[in-house]
Every structure is written in structure tokens, then in C-alpha cells.
Amino acid sequence: MHLSEYSYILSILRVNLRKPEGQILLSRSKSHFSTNNSKEKLILIIGSKFIFEMSSTKIIVIGGDAAGMSAASKIRRSHENWEITVYEKSPHTSYSACGMPYYIGGLVSSSKELVARSPETFREKYNIEAKPLHEVIQIDPKKQKVLVKDLKSETSFWDNYDKLLIATGASPNKPPLPFIDSKGIFCLSTLQSGINTWEFINKHKPQKAVIVGGGYIGVEMAEALLERGMDVTLIDRNPYIMKTLDSDMSEDICSALTKAGVKLHLDENLTAFESGDDGKVKKVITDKNQFEAGLVILGMGVSPNSGIAKEAGIKLCDTAAIMVDKKMQTSIENIWAAGDCASSYHQLREKHLFVALGTIANKHGLVAGSNMSGEEMKFPGVIGTAITKFQDLEISRTGLTEREAKAFDIPYETATIKSSNFASYYPGSGDIKVKLLVRTESREILGAQILGNKGSAKRIDTIAACIMGKLTAYELAMMDLAYVPPLSNVWDPIQIAARRLI
Ligand SMILES: Cc1cc2nc3c(=O)[nH]c(=O)nc-3n(C[C@H](O)[C@H](O)[C@H](O)COP(=O)(O)OP(=O)(O)OC[C@H]3O[C@@H](n4cnc5c(N)ncnc54)[C@H](O)[C@@H]3O)c2cc1C
């Protein structure tokens, strides 16, 4: 068929198959194939498959960050003419929440550097209709439509979809305590929350900061606020921080924080806040102490944003994340979910969990986008790999900790070794500590935790690959890994640990 005939078919179909508001109906009802001209009728029939492929699917994505935009971009790469609309309730799309501590700490000069692609870029370069400041407040799965609130004009409207992706992320946990909404108390989630924190620090120049929660965000923010010259107190209700690691590893992290000047208060429960007449936070009160504070950062964990999915009748897992299968499909036809709001199957724990990580959200988005495009792809699940750093101390973990292995009744053996991050004679070398776990019978690697100086933590990736490949301690010890004195040791520290468990 000549190109001009394709254009002719397209123009006829566009006129005939669109509702007044622009919804293409080819996938829904044949009654819309209306024309009196017999040539046009024939063209409609011949061209229907072609046009279906070309332009008949309307995609709606709820949430315009890692998972949502990964999926939207994948769908666009596969289908040039599908209509893709992304509703995002904040002003930004495709931003790096992970970069916010470094922006607040002053290492990244502008919040703009944290934005990979703006709504304008998506619109102009990728033909993806990204709509910031638009919140989806209801899903009607039977009629395949969503209710959208335009947050600028305060008006609402319904929009139809053929395929829907829920990528609404997670929200920080905020206990319902007196004065929790005082000025100067921040949770980090969207880029806007990071900008608000940065602006508050610059305007009010707080001297004393209290961080509640010693997880990844708490530790990263402790470094950031020290960088900004603040006096930093960190409180946690647990007896040690970074509880995704074992306590013997966490002790080293506590020492590093204390050495850097962070006042650690462990085993202490937040009970209230006090604020002044100006509405600004003044004090953080725990069951044991009172702390003056001009700035408070809450890093008390996150929960999946699954409310609208639940209301629409979509099945959730017991962590309240949206239950998805390996193709990121939810329990309702034509609805997928991805990212922090969706469940992830844990390969070692053999259950669906809620894991809020950018690494996972991006993979979820690609898998959801592929399946929504009609190209089958499966997400194999997670094993709990995570990494961070506090000043010079790099921290990482994968698989199961000793505490988890005990809790799940998995027979294990463990070895902890201390070595140098690269050849000890090479200038600038430092420490590394590796804790490795194997299954007692099979000697398969179960998990690892690494602490150390430059270049230490990313060694966890090799161990993650071993766990996913079901390799044994012997296979890791004999693996052909690279060595040069400025970067490693002739026996890499992870292989020294593996040798102990052969
Ligand atoms: C401070 C910080 C540091 C982090 N560091 C790391 C790190 O180093 N490594 C790592 O792997 N992960 C890190 N994470 C986690 C990572 O940022 C998230 O896992 C990732 O952003 C999740 O992507 P997502 O697309 O699922 O959700 P989000 O990034 O949360 O995006 C969801 C989007 O949906 C929007 N939305 C929600 N509800 C609606 C609605 N009803 N209508 C319209 N829009 C809606 C939200 O505004 C949001 O923009 C960090 C997170 C934070 C906060």
C-alpha cells in the first residue's frame, strides 16, 4: 500500500473512530464504524488492525516519577501512536528523590539537577502528555475511567483509559502527635518536600536539628545536616540504627555517627512536639528526654499509596501494597501497578512484600510498560539489596541477615572478616568488614552485609548476583574476580569471607 493511502486510511479512521472528546473507540464498539461510502467502509475494515496497532490504545499512568515514567517511556518506545497521559499530583516529573539529601546538604547546587525529564520534555520530545498538579482521586474499573482533580483550578473531570498503570509511590509515616504539622517539621518524599526543606533551612538557619528514625533517610540526612553546620540529634525507638542490618554491623555505624558528632538517643520513643507562637517547632519530646529543635526530619518509614486502588476493589497484600503478579498486573483486568505502591516477591522469604526502592521502581516500571505494550516480560522478584553511606563509611546489604535467617527458621552459618578495601600498602587504603551467611546444608549464599571505606559497599552486587544465581560459598571463593592494588586485594574481601564458609 502506498504511503498516501495509509494517510488516507488514518484520516478516515480518526474522523470515524473518535468520540467528541477524542477517545478512540475501535477497541470498544464496532457501532462507531459509520460511513455511507463503500470505499471508506472497505478501508475501515482493512485498516482496522493496522489502526488498532497504530493509535487505538489510550494509556493513563497515575504518578509521574520512577515507576510511572519508566513505564510511559517504554510504552512510547513500543507504540509511537498510542495516547499516553500521566497524571502527577506534584509539580515535578521524573525526579531523583534519592538525591535530595545531597541537595539539602549542599553538594548538589540546584533542585533542577535532580529532575531527569520535566513535564515539558515529556510532552515535546516524547509525545507523552504529562500533567503535573493533577491528582487522580478515584478509579472506576468497570467503566475504565479515572476521576482527576486539577489542583490549580480546583476542578474535576473523568478521563477514560484502555490500560491503566498505578504508580503512586509511598508516603512517609507521620504519627498523629500534637504539633506534628508545625513549621520546620519535614518528611522527605517528593522533590517538592526536598525543596521545602532546603528553603526552610536557608530562610530560618536552624542551629539544632533532630532526626527521628535511624534508617537510610535518617542516616543520609544526618550527614547532610552536619554538612550544613547544624548540631544533630538522632533518636530511634530501636536499640540500634539501620535495623535492616544485624546489630553487630550496626554498632559500627553508630560509632561512625557518634564520632562525627551526631548525638544518638536509642531505645527512645517520640511522644510529642512543642511549637512557638510563630507556629515553628521548638522541641521534640520523647519518653526519656526533651530536645530543642529548629528543624525536625522524620524518617519513620513509608507506607504504600494504595488507597485509591483499594477503593476500586483491587487486591492488596498484607503489607497494604498493591498485589501484582510477575507481569505487574493487578487483580483487575487492564490495570497494572508498579513501584513503591506495588508488592514485590521476595525470593528468599518466598512472600510478597512492600519494598520502597528506586532500583525496584524502575524495573517494575519497565516490566509493567512492556506488558502493557503487549510484550511479555516478568519481574523475577527481589532479594533485599540496598546501599547507602555516612561520610566515609559505605554501608550495604543483600539477602537475609542473621536475625532474619533465625526468624524464618533457616539453618545458616555465618563468617565475618575484616580486611582492607584495597592493597593496604597503596596510599589511601582503609577498612572493610564483610559478614556473609550461607545455608548450612547446601552452602548456598543466603545474605551479606558490608561496611567499609571507598569501594567497599558496591561489592555487595557480586554477592547479590551469587544469591540470585543460587551459587555456593565455594563458587564465590573461586570466582574469577578482578584485582589491581589501587582497587582491590588479590583475594577480594568477599572471597576471603566465602573461603571461611566453603
Ligand atoms: C530521601 C530519599 C532518599 C532515597 N534514596 C534512595 C536510594 O539511594 N536508593 C534507592 O534505591 N531508593 C531510594 N529512595 C527511594 C526511591 O526514591 C523510591 O523508591 C522511588 O522514588 C519510588 O518510585 P515510584 O515511582 O514508585 O514512587 P514515587 O517516586 O513516590 O512517585 C510516585 C509519584 O506519584 C505521585 N502520586 C501519588 N498519588 C497520586 C495520585 N493519586 N494522583 C497523581 N499523582 C500521584 C506522587 O506525587 C509521586 O510523584 C529514596 C527515597 C527518599 C525519599
Image (spheres, rainbow, N blue to C red):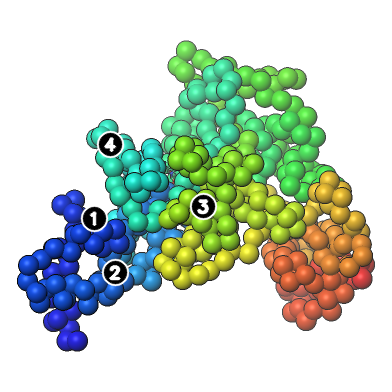
- Number of residues whose C-alpha sits closer than 10 Å to that of mark 3, classed few (under 14), some (14–19) or many (20 or more): many
Whether the residue carrying mark 3 lies under 8 Å from ligand 1 is answered with no
Q: Marks 4 and 1, Cα distance to the nearest angstrom?
A: 18 Å
Q: Which of the 4 quarters of the picture holds residue 299?
A: top right
**Closer to the N terminus: mark 3 or mark 4?**
4
Tag 4: amino acid: Ser
Percent position of residue 425, x then y: 82, 71
Q: Amino acid at mark 2?
A: Phe
Distance (Cα) linking label 3 and label 4: 26 Å
Name the residue that disc number 1 marks. 23
Disc 3 residue type (three-letter): Thr
From the image, tell me which residue sits under label 2.
52
For this rendering, which residue is in front, 136 or 447?
Answer: 136
Depth check: give the residue in front, 447 or 216.
447
Q: Residues within 10 Å of mark 4 (few under 14, many from 20)?
A: some
Where is 231 relative to 27, above or below?
above
Camera sees residue 118: no
Residue pointed to by mark 4: 156
Residue at horizontal 35%, vertical 56%? 162
Q: Residue furthest bottom?
A: 1
Residue wearing tag 3? 330
* Residues under numbered marks 1 and 3 in contact, where contact means CB atoms less than 8 Å apart: no
Query: CA–CA distance between discs 2 and 1?
Result: 13 Å
User: How far, Cα to Cα, is label 1 from label 3?
Assistant: 24 Å
Q: Earlier in the sequence, mark 2 or mark 3?
A: 2
Identify the residue at horizontal 62%, vertical 50% (top origin). Answer: 355
